[in-house]
Amino acid sequence: MRLLTARLSTRLSRGRRGKYAGSVVMLLGLLVTGGAYAVLAPAQASDEAAAQSTVDDGRALFLIGCASCHGKNGEGISTQAGTQYGPPLAGVGAAAVDFQVGTGRMPLARPGVQAPVKDVVYTDAEIESLAAFVASLGAGPAIPEQDAYDPLAIPEDELNEAIVRGGQFFRTNCTACHNFAGAGGALSYGKYAPALDGVTPKHIYEALITGPQQMPVFSDGVLKPEEKRDIIAYLESVEASPDYGGSSLGSIGPVSEGIAGWLVGIGTLVGFCVWIASSSTRSKKGKP
Amino acid sequence: MTTNGATAAKAKKASPVGSAANWVDERVGLATLAKKQVRKVFPDHWSFMLGEIALWSFVVLLLTGTFLTLWFKPSMAEVVYNGSYDQLRGMHMSESYASTLDISFDVRGGLLMRQMHHWAALIFIASMLVHLLRVYFTGAFRKPRELNWVIGCLLLLLGTLEGFTGYSLPDDLLSGTGLRAADGFVKSIPVVGTYVSFFLFDGEFPGDAIISRLYTAHVLLLPGVLLALVGAHMLLLVFHKHTQWPGPGRTEQNVVGYPLLPVYAAKAGGFFFIVFGITALMGALMTINPIWRIGPYDPSQVTAGSQPDWYMGWPDGALRIFPGWETSLFGFTIPWNVFLPIIVLPGVMFTILLMLPFIETWITGDKRDHHLLERPRDAPNRTATMVALMTFYGLLWAAGGNDVLALVFNMSLNNIIYFMRVMVFLGPVLAFIIARRWCISLQRADENRILHGYETGVIMRSPEGAYAEKHLPVSADEAFTLTARDRDPIMAAPTEADENGVAARKVHLNRLRYKLNQWWYSHNVQKPTAGELEEARHHAEHELAVHQGEIGHSADGHQFDGRSDTQNESPRQH
Amino acid sequence: MSDHTTDVATREPADEPIPNPGLHEHQPRPTDVDEAAEKRAERQIAAFFGLSALFAILFVVAYFSFEIGGEPDLIMGYGASNLTLGLSLGLALLLIGIGAIQWARKLMSDVEIVEMRHPAASPPEDRAIAISSFEAGVEESGIARRPLIRNSMLAALGALGLPLIVGLRDLGPAPGSALAETVWRRGMRLVNDVSGAPIRPGEVEIGQLINGEPAVFFRNDEEGEPLYEGVELNQAKAKAAIIMVRMRPEEITPAEGRENWGIDGILCFSKICTHVGCPISLWEQQTHHLLCPCHQSTFDLADNGKVLFGPAARALPQLPLMVDDEGYLVAQSDFNEPVGPSYWERG
């Protein structure tokens, strides 16, 4: 039995030699591979139903996503040379996990001097489980209550005073690394203090109490919880403030202002100079 | 009109303006002055307007600055802030900071004027720098204009100081940190450092006098000197007349251009409004120095990204990359790490800048008047010198923003500093060599154009198979412009003694001078003589003799200077 | 190579390879020959000026329309007053300028005019007259013949320099030993800046950074007035500001004599950089490096504040700590060296 008639085979072979034949094959290949992966790949964590926040769920997640650097029991892993590969997690507390995983810093995509903010990989429930597991490894800072960090918890009539005081704490403790507008700043050897816009109040509080990476710890014993909340209130209020004078140019300071002055100012003015001294069109009409 | 109105005007019926002019003339003899200046000729080129940007932005600074003085309080007395800006209400701060907040938030148009004033300041100094570069690269500083160069350099220095005193007035965290650093700079001066510091600040830093003292300097003393120097600068310009580019009709003895009234009055006057307008647009659209976010000055606070304004960037960069050298002897300390980059280096750089015309005259021995400008390529060593200085300046300027560079471009702060420590020495040397060779090769290209004409893009093939591109002579205008420059002067080799046997003085100095002179003009391509030009033209005739092709006769090299008949050919328009 | 027989001082016209073609004949612009083009240009320029006047009026409207202050009017997230005032003012000015320039370029005569230069030097006759007049004047004054008058005059004028210089003496006090001391004394408590709260060692965690001040800045006198405020507070703060950090004790290598300057790994250093005096508080808790934001001097606080990198030359001064009866951290004494930037008399 012939499956292909002569006419059909001619048509097919003509199609195979057509201009777009290669692209079509490629497209089909991609669709098939992608589809097969989607159907056949092992179930992702996000496919599971929301699990209850138990230490065991956390351990299960930890073993998949974190143990390769932090060790199966969070004991930390050192390299052969004796330097740290992944730090031990006993005592960092649930707050550290909530901050690191909640901002996408962890899991770390590749080793480097700094863990950058990137897309969050885990759901809120999973982060809770991970935090619970790590908290079980050793006592550490707990995830703060909402009233501790939410500026809305400040009574209305005290709000402005809190904002002003928060600004004073901010300029004393934070601007040296993070800059006056929270735009970030450079540290040594490629490290940096990140920009603060868009960071949630809870994460700011957690960063203050856990001191992630190079950031120092600001314990509740010295920088009281209300004072931390004041700082957060100040940051929220300036973030909500308009740019009174026009584009803020990144709030980096005189460097960006100088660049703008040269490029925009001198640039347009020299452009005008060229126009002013240029000769006008000449007429072909000849003299009157 | 091809004259400048030098003949007497006919008497007209008395008009209001005329009677007013009469009244003034009868008291100050205005007409004698006016008769020469009203139709004064100025040449036209965009690069001649760069100094005008500086002039007009200075006027903008005076106007906007006067507005600000009506509300600003230059006092360090502590007040409690009760203005509109909520985030600072109830805080203790100096009166100068509080009054700046008031100008920004409680005076309509106040924020605009503050921003316009600051943008105009940045433009003022930038345009002076650009103008300086133009003057240097075109050789406009040569005799008789060396004094104007000196005045210009002083204007640049004073402008920088004016800017520094100005942005320190609001007493905010950023500029206060700058003053703190300035105190450290001053303390590093040997022997008298602490006295200068205590006299400047009326005691220990920060004291309560510095803001009002800077105010006096910024509003009275420095503008006074600036105005006087700007006036002198303009007077010399009027007296010497402006330089001009070589071209048809232009010689060392004339100025070709347009009259002051009406053309330059319109162009320069119009440009003032343009500078003012652009400054206003910048003040409308871009925030500069948001002191309300930065906060009031506190000696225990600092912000990341602490830089001075751009024009102080290069000494700041020198300060950042300098190694930590300090000497302690017999109970006295000399902090070289501060003293050298921030006190000595700017002084040395400024002195070099000031002396450039005189150094060049000493090397070249050229004592002629120069009113025609030189293309940068025609003075390779001069151009290369300034390129090297610019490279040095630029690297230090970038080093001054090293932490911002590290943050924005994700680089290692320390590596930037190591890089800069090497490049500030290597870079200028490389830049000098490259710029010089580039100029010389451009000169050679020019010589080719004059002698052999321009490339037409028409390829011709001889019967033997050889390919040749047809060249046609450049237009007479271009040929003249390219050859309108001077030949390099010759310096006689220094002798031990002159012909009468009298021993020469300063033998070593003269020998050095001669060596520098020879090196200065080495590899310079001189313009061809009339004989060489003729030879080249007829050489072209021989070359093209076989390529008669479409034109039916060989090119004899005199196509477009009126000496031979051209029928179907037209030179390329430039 | 061309010949070099030319003398430096002269420019021989015969040597010029190409003669000066002279000024070109003027080529007219459309507005020079075409009535319609001229009228169009006139209208365009008038339109610019008219538009400028319109924007000037808009400025007045914007001035009175938009609120500033605590609750300003906004346009697209920017302050409306600044934006509209600036745009209207800017365009009003710019359009006058553009109109004037267009007037010059399109309508004013652009026939090139030639003016002759004159040498900058005065003519020799003028010089001669000037010199002889000057000499006559000097001769009549007799200053050359009367050295007594001349010298005494110079001495008198020179002596005027003294009042000028001395008159400025009270610009400021002599430095004395002011720079070598701070307000820190034995037993003075360290407090958290801004809040003024004293600190117990137990409250300080490993990796912590505290920006601190001497407690005396937050105390009042008998009348309830602050002991330090205004200028005095700022002057004292500029030397007395400190930072405290806590590290694991095994990571610290104290210098000889400094073994008891820390409490359980809590160390206290001056916050004022030894380079030019900026406050430092960029504490990298894992590397123990303290980085100054101004010029990037880096200090190792685990190693007595030694300079690791950058332009600072001297280590950061350390404040010795102890604990008082109530358990709060206090200073053992003032710093053992001057704080802040180096100066000549520092020693």
Image (cartoon, coloured by chain):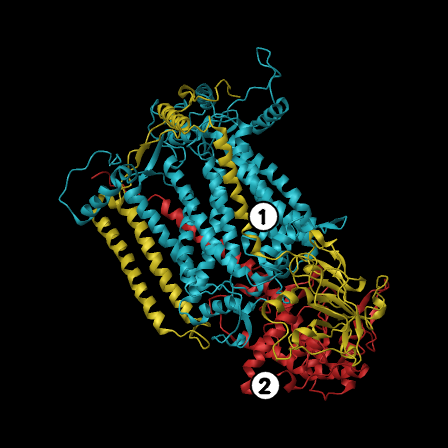
Residue at the extreme bottom of the image, as rendered: A52
Instruction: Report crowding for label 2: few under 14, some 14 to 19, many 20 or more residues within 10 A (C-alpha).
Output: some
Q: B66 or A21, which lies in front? A: B66
Query: Residue under mark 1: which chain is it in?
Result: B
Residue at the extreme top of the image, as rendered: B500
| C56 up-or-down from B162: above or below | below
Q: Which residue is rendered at x = 50% and y = 53% of the image?
A: B162
SS of the residue at dot 1? helix
> Which mark is on residue A154?
2
Q: Amino acid at mark 2?
A: Ile
Q: Determine the image quadrant of residue A64.
A: bottom right
The reply to whether residue B213 is in sight is yes
Query: Residue under mark 2: which chain is it in?
Result: A
Q: Which residue is rendered at x = 50% and y = 54% of the image?
A: B163
Residue at the extreme front of the image, as rendered: C148
Specify the chain shown as red: A
Q: Amino acid at mark 1?
A: Gly
Specify the chain shown as yellow: C
Specify the chain shown as cyan: B
Residue B307 x/y as whole percent:
59, 58
| B92 up-or-down from C39: above or below | below
Q: Which residue is mark 1?
A: B394
Q: Which residue is rendered at x = 47% and y = 58% of the image?
A: B119
